[in-house]
Amino acid sequence: MEWQQLLGFYQTAKLGSFTKAAEATFRTQSALTQQVKALEEELQCRLFERLGRQVRLTQAGEKLFKFAEETFARYEHLKEEMQDLLGRPGGRLRLAAPFTTLYHLLPATIKEYARRFPHVELTILDRPQGQVIRLVQSGDIDFGLVLEAAAPKNLVRTRWRRVRTAIMVPEGHPLTRTERVSLEAIARHPLILPPRSLEYSGRERLEDMFRQENLRYQVVMESANVELSALYVSLGLGLAFATISGDRLSLKPENIVFLPLDHYFQTGHIVLITKPAREIAAYKQAFIQLLLGEGDSEADPLP
């Protein structure tokens, strides 16, 4: 069994396709297929069931996949230990979070971490919340930052920052003179909402709330980006919902007012998520400590 054969098999199993795995490993599909075939001949069993262009692991394939996953994880840990021996603590640290979190909440932490650990190879991905979760589950990234309500319980979840839901309106809007903003009052104005998608579950929840109160509303624009939504709110196109840490986000244009909706939405948290692991490299632990040191005080892992 050769290393490249195992790597090709592992990527094929993860991606469910020889075509996608060939692209991910920078080789031809024919070469990858031959490597997997050689593995099957060596182990004397089929590793995949072919379903058109897709593939599915056999029972033997599932056993080899688990072996490959553990092998690659141990190899990464070995490289980290070698760097420690050389006095250059480092390795790879892969992090994913939605754009708003990366843009507004993480820059200072990332800058300080990069200064302290120049030998760590950082990979930062801007991804919607659903993709962040899937990347953590698959082991393609080390850490993710998502809303606690969306985080699966089979992942390790550590609270980082409190967040609340607010409605964004332009300065001088009539709702700014209302002490307690109601859904009925919001529904009288055009709305900017996220797209209907599994990646943006907040849209479905908002529509359910309007239906429960039998309210008609107009969606004037769909936007999954709070900065883009804020721009059009400032132009008077419509109102938009936002999840914020603290009292507001630092947005441009700045003539945006955030009206809290705590009477409709409970205070939530952004959580750091990762797969359960017996041990975490020291340089990754350092990132966690730095991140949580700049968050809220509630930093205990959730059950």
Image (cartoon, rainbow, N blue to C red):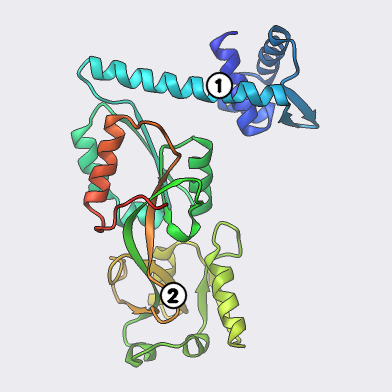
Q: Secondary structure at mark 2?
A: loop
Residue in the image at 41% along x and 54% along y = 99
Give the answer, above or below, for where 89 lies relative to 109.
above
Q: Nearer the viewer, residue 293 or 180?
A: 293
- Residue furthest right as drawn: 52
Q: Earlier in the sequence, mark 1 or mark 2?
A: 1
Mark 1 → mark 2, Cα distance in angstroms: 44 Å
User: Percent from the top left, x then y, of residue 77?
Assistant: 38, 22
Q: Nearer the viewer, residue 282 or 165?
A: 282
Residue 265: mark? 2
Label 1 sits on residue: 68
Residue in the image at 53% along x and 25% along y = 69
Identified by mark 1, the residue type is Ala
Query: Which picture quadrant has residue 179?
Result: bottom left
Query: Which picture quadrant has residue 261?
Result: bottom left
User: Percent from the top left, x then y, of residue 17?
Assistant: 68, 30
Q: Circles 1 and 2: CB distance less than 8 Å? A: no
Q: Nearer the viewer, residue 93 or 224?
A: 93
Query: Which picture quadrant has residue 164?
Result: bottom left
- Pick the quarter of the image with the N terminus: top right
